[in-house]
Image: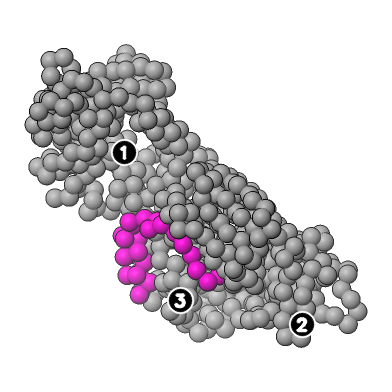
Amino acid sequence: MSIIPIRMLNELSYCERLFHLMHVQGLFEQSADTIEGTMQHNRAERHRRPSDVGDVTAWGQAPRSLTLGDEKLGIIGKLDAIRVTDSGLWEPVESKHSSAPSGDATFRVGEWVLDGSAWPNDQIQLCAQGLLLQANGFPCEAGRLHYRGNRKTVRIQWSEDLVAATLATIRRAQELESSAMPGPLVNSDKCFRCSLNQVCLPHETMLLGGLTDGASKLRDIVPSRDDLGTVYVTEPGSRVSKRGYELVVQLPTDERLEIPLKDVRHISLFGNVQATTQLIHECMSQGISISYLTSGGRLVGMVHDLVTKNIHVREAQFRRFRDEEVRMHLAKSVVRAKILNQRTMLRRNAQHMDASILAEMSELAKRVVRSATASSLLGVEGMAAKAYMAAFPQMLRVRDVPEGEILMNGRNRRPPKDPVNALLSLAYSLLERDMYVALATAGLDPLFGFYHTIVPGRPALVLDMMEPFRAIVADSVVIRCLNTGVIQWDDFYIGPEACALKPNARKRFFQAYERRMHETVTHPVFQYKLSYRRMLELEARFLARFLMDDIPDYRPIVTR
């Protein structure tokens, strides 16, 4: 029998799917409520004074907080505050960010009736604390809930119904640890206040699973974009560190920049840039990832926390990616989406486009579906890539190219030999970085893919999943930068065997890439607006859900 953290009993009472995501899969996302609750909790910790009443032989005074566990009950947890009454009874005290209910009516949980002056999930969490105190020899008959929202304190007595409901919740938690993830709540108002609504994706899951008729309007509860920023440090000899709650960037020129860590989602370090151990530890604790790239922009490594204990998703990934039918199905899906998105880019941006090329791309997308082997699929993808890259210059409107110079000569790399390929390679590295973060956040192993060959050190799944986004994200940034003059011919170092972007121009390119990732567009399936960065995360989560049989199929995004 496993030991359940008492905090998870609150989540289970609120929603069984939330419990499974947080406790079984180890997923967590901050929300405005959780951040505010943490801040208020920390303020209370700093100013709390221990009681001077209690068992002096055991403690001298009641402790500020106490961590207790009991194997028989099967729970463990930290009691943040304890109150000892004049009669010597111990009472756990729990503070909540929300407001207390009116208390006009009782609550029914299963077959049990609970007090109406506090929310049922809060009562069950508090009662579990009381049971822990009793099991460890401390007399306890009641506890207190303080609701900060309406500044109301409620005393909850351990009724027979409350104790029975709490014990039943503990048993259910232990059952769910070895069970499949429960289905989402149906049209519940709880979803709007849930910190994991963008991970749970309740209505989206039901829509993709065919559990709705498709006529009802999709509830727009997923945040349209992540308002946190990405920090790029490219100046050789720079040093990034932590000071209090600030990210400090020290440039070789002695210029110093300070950025609140709460506003940062990712840090990209290019070339000879140093990061202190203290900063790395802080970033891992806050879920801020760090990428290391060469001075030329090639991704060489990532630093992130353990991300998730969600071994279940990785186990499903390893098991199902060994199934040739599953691998082929996923591979055909991403290649088809890639070709259709390339066709859309040509249709939207190319000047005097030959209709036969668009027709060829459409036919190649159909041939993908008919491909029977991985080698034939590679052949179809190669033909589409050749046609697309041959037509790529028709999407460019650059007028400052010196006579005799070449802006683009097909697709070339390692190293790129012309300005367009230099920009494409850099844009693909940034997209690779962002897709890596999205997959790791969803609990997937970025190195174990279904289409690209498994090679030590190569993030095969990242390369698989970024295929549909190459044209609509990376290529789009390159086209926009060149056509609007953000990047010009003089912004490149051009040699006989290589071409690279100059430092100042590279900063402008990073800004253009971030603007693209921050743009919101209408999702072709769900019809609400999302940023491209949020779409990457959504794609990673839907792949994980498909692998865990939460949805019947994975369909990559195809823009219109």
Q: Position of residue 533 (x, y in %)?
A: 57, 54
The residues tagged by marks 2 and 3 sit, at their Cα atoms, a distance apart of 30 Å
Q: Is residue 153 left or right of residue 470?
A: left
- Is residue 80 part of the magenta span, yes or no? no
Q: Secondary structure at mark 2?
A: loop
In the figure, residue 104 lies in which quadrant?
top left
Q: Position of residue 409 (x, y in %)?
A: 76, 81
Q: Is residue 199 left or right of residue 503?
A: left
Q: Is residue 253 above or below residue 214?
A: below
Residues drawn in magenta: 299-323
* Residue that numbered label 1 is attached to: 11
Q: Is residue 398 above or below residue 18?
A: below
* Residue that numbered label 2 is attached to: 495
* Residue that numbered label 3 is attached to: 457
Q: How many marks?
A: 3
Q: Is residue 85 left or right of residue 181?
A: left
Q: Position of residue 334 (x, y in %)?
A: 53, 68
Give the camera-side residue of 296 and 343.
296
Number of the label disc, if any, that sits on residue 538: none
Q: Secondary structure at mark 3?
A: loop
Q: Residue at x 24, y 48 (%)?
A: 176
Name which residue type carries label 2: Gly
Q: Residue at x 37, y 62 (%)?
A: 547
Q: Residue at x 55, y 49 (%)?
A: 247
Q: Is residue 487 visible?
A: yes
Circle 1 residues within 10 Å: few <14, some 14–19, many ≥20 = many
Q: Are marks 2 and 3 in contact (CB under 8 Å)?
A: no
Q: Secondary structure at mark 1?
A: helix
